[in-house]
Amino acid sequence: MTAGQTEMDSSGRGTGGLRSRSFLALLVTQGFGSLNDNVFRWFCVLQGMKVEELKTSTISLGLICFTTPYLLLASHSAYVSDRFSKRKTIVACKFAEIVIMAIAVGAMALGGVDEMLGICLVFVAVFLMGAQSAMFGPAKFGAIPEIVRSEKISEANGMMQMVTTAASALGMFAGFVVSDMADLSPDAPTLAGLLWPAGVLISIAVLGAVASMAIEPLTPADPARQPPNPFKETVSNLALLYQGRPLFRAALGEAFFWFLASLATSAITLMGEQVLGLGQTATGMLAIALVVGVGTGSVLAGMMSGGKVEFGAPSRWADRSSSWDHWACIGSPVMSTPRTPPPRWPPSGRQPPA
C-alpha cells in the first residue's frame, strides 16, 4: 500500500487486516492515550489526597472531573467523527493532549506556591483530559470498520479492549509510582518536584501523537452533517438505542462493566492505603490482577465470536465465570477466617503477671 492510500473500499468499509499499518497505529495510539489518562488521573487523585481539605473526596472528585465531559460531549463527539475524517480527529485529539499536559504541568508548578489552588487547577486539567478522551472515543471506535475487514471487526474490538485495559492497569500503577517519586509540597523545590510528572506525562502524550500520524487517511463518513442540538440528539439517540434491543442490552452491559471498574479501582485504592497500610506503589500493584483479567476476557470474547458479532457465546461464558466468581467470593472470607477465636488476655478472673 502506497503512502496516502486509504484502507477503505468504495463503500467505506475497511480492507485491511489486524496487522495492517493503520490498525497497529490505532492500537498504539489508544494504548498511549489510555496510559496517559490513567497516569494523569491517578497522579492527581493521589496528590489531592495529600491535601487535608480534599483527602476524603479526592477519588470521587477525580472520577467526576474525568467522566462528566463524556456526558456533555456525547452527541458532539459523534458529529465531529462523522463530519470530518476520523484520522484527522484522532490526530487533533492527540496534539490537544500535549497542550493539556503542558497546562497541567503549569498548574503543578503553581501548586509549589499555593498547594490548594494548584491541586484545584490540576483537576481542571483532568476535566480537559476527559473532554479530549470523549472526543477521541467515537473516532477511534468508528475507525475500526473503516480500517479492518468486516470479518475481523470482533477480533479488532477485542484487541482494542485488551490494549485499553492493559494500558489502564499500567497507567494506574505508574500513577502511583510517579506520585510516590514526586514532591509538589510548597516546601519542595519546584523543579525537582515537577521533574517526574512533567517528563512522564508530556513524553507519553508526544508518543501518542506521533503514533496517530501513522494511520492512513480516512474519508469522512458524512461530510454534509450539520451540528446537532446536544439535548435533542441525546434523547433521539437513546430512543434509537432502545429500539434495537440487542444493542440496548449490550450498552447496558458495557455501562455496568464500567460502573464496576470504577467502583473496584476506587475500593482498591482505599483498601490498600487505609486498610492494609500499603504505600502508594504497593497499592498500585493491586490493580494489575484486576485489569489483566479484563484484558484476557476481552481477547477470549473476540476469539469465541468466530469472526462475527456474537451475543450468545461470550455471554454464556460470562454467566459461568460470574457464578465461579460468586462462589469464590463467598468462600474467600470463610477460608481466611480463623477456625477458633483468638485467646483473650488476660483470662477471665485473672490478672496479667507482673
Image (cartoon, grey):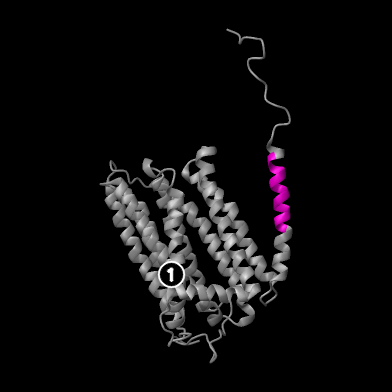
Q: Compared with residue 87, is residue 204 higher up or lower down, i.e. above or below?
A: above
- Give whichever of 275, 208 is nearer the camera: 275
Residue at 61%, 71% in the rendered image: 248
Q: Is residue 132 magenta?
A: no
Seen from this angle, which residue lies furthest left?
113
Quickly name the residue at label 1. 73
Q: Residue furthest toward the bottom? A: 10
Residue 11 is situated, as x and y percent measured from the top left of the image, at: 55, 90
Q: Position of residue 103 (x, y in %)?
A: 31, 60
- Is 40 placed left or right of 187 in the picture? right
Q: Quadrant of residue 96?
A: bottom left
Q: Which residues are magenta?
A: 321-333
| Residue 339 x, y percent position in the rendering | 73, 31
Please tell me which residue lies in front, 9 or 241.
241
Would you say 212 lies left or right of 155 here?
left
Which residue is depicted at the point 50% across and 78% down? 22
Relative depth, front residue between 353 and 319:
319
